[in-house]
Amino acid sequence: MTEEFEAHRPKLFGLAYRMLGSVAEAEDAVQDAYLRWRGAERESIDSPGAWLARVVTNLCLNRLTAARTTRERYVGFWLPEPAPTGALGPLETVEQRDSVSLAFLVLLERLTPAERAVFVLREAFSYGYGEIAEVLDLSEANCRQLYGRARRHVGEHRRFDAPGDQGRKIAERFLAAARSGDLAGLEQVLAADVTAWADGGGKVAAVLRPIIGREKVIRYVIGIAIKFGDGVEFGHAEVNGQDAMLAWRGDELVAVFVMEVADGMIVGLRTVLNPDKLSPFLRLADV
């Protein structure tokens, strides 16, 4: 019983994480699904994978309603909880990798819970409309309508692709320039229209609105480097399918910087500073 569930856990966590944008809430949803699995009558379940996907999706739909209220009261700019790429289940296609990026998860916040469920199942897991209809207990026609609306709300988002070790090299150049105050070096890695976001959640000082444009982002980055000072160590990681830098003060993780790279330049920089969002990352990363 437990073995069979564990075989599905990575996919279920990936589904719940895309639905909720939170590591902790996704883990709770999967655990709740496990408890329901243990109490279910096995003979009535034809397809364990489909049954579990339905349970997790509906648990997430219930949680999304409460999450919306919480996020409306959130202090500053809300970002999803970062997650190590390896913990997010199979990412075998460009679409699957893109569907866990912080940029994509922020876009999904525009959708209603039902639209988000249809969109995630269709885009990230390639479910057919018939399968989605069974999971959500809706008609195929309704699922098609929800998917169409979701596509319009999300719009044509850009995909960021840094093949091979290009992303890591850009991240290292960015870090070296930021720490040394090399303005010319930062200009070489930041796109003219680069945008930076930060999430402190009211727990840690952070800018409350997006910073747009190379010159403003350079000043912002230099300010962060000065604030952290010499007592902070940096390391490279892959987070949400993208290159990132982790900032450590001793054994304490104090920030995760996730970079979006296009055409050899950083076009987006998302910084998670809220310690409540960094704790789940550490647990998944096992560092």
Image (cartoon, grey):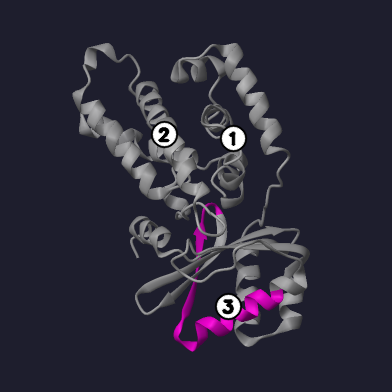
Q: Earlier in the sequence, mark 3 or mark 2?
A: 2
The residues colored magenta run 218-241
From the image, tell me which residue sits under label 3: 224
Please rate how many residues cluster around mark 2, counting C-alpha atoms within 10 Å: few if below 14, some from 14 to 19, many from 20. many
Q: Tell me the CA gap for discs 3 and 2.
A: 35 Å
Q: Which mark is residue 178?
A: none
Secondary structure at badge 1 equals loop
Secondary structure at badge 3 equals helix
Residue kind at label 2, given as amino acid type = Cys
222 magenta-colored? yes
Q: Which mark is residue 111?
A: 1
Percent coordinates x, y for residue 278 in the rendering: 41, 62
Of 214 and 13, nearer the camera is: 214
Q: At 27% across and 30% down in the image, what residue appears?
A: 4
Residue kind at label 3, given as amino acid type = Ile
Residue kind at label 1, given as amino acid type = Leu
Q: Tell me the CA gap for discs 2 and 1.
A: 14 Å
Where 226 falls versus 255 (above or below)?
below
Of 35 and 3, nearer the camera is: 35
From the image, tell me which residue sits under label 2: 60
Q: At 68% across and 47% down in the image, what residue appears?
A: 159
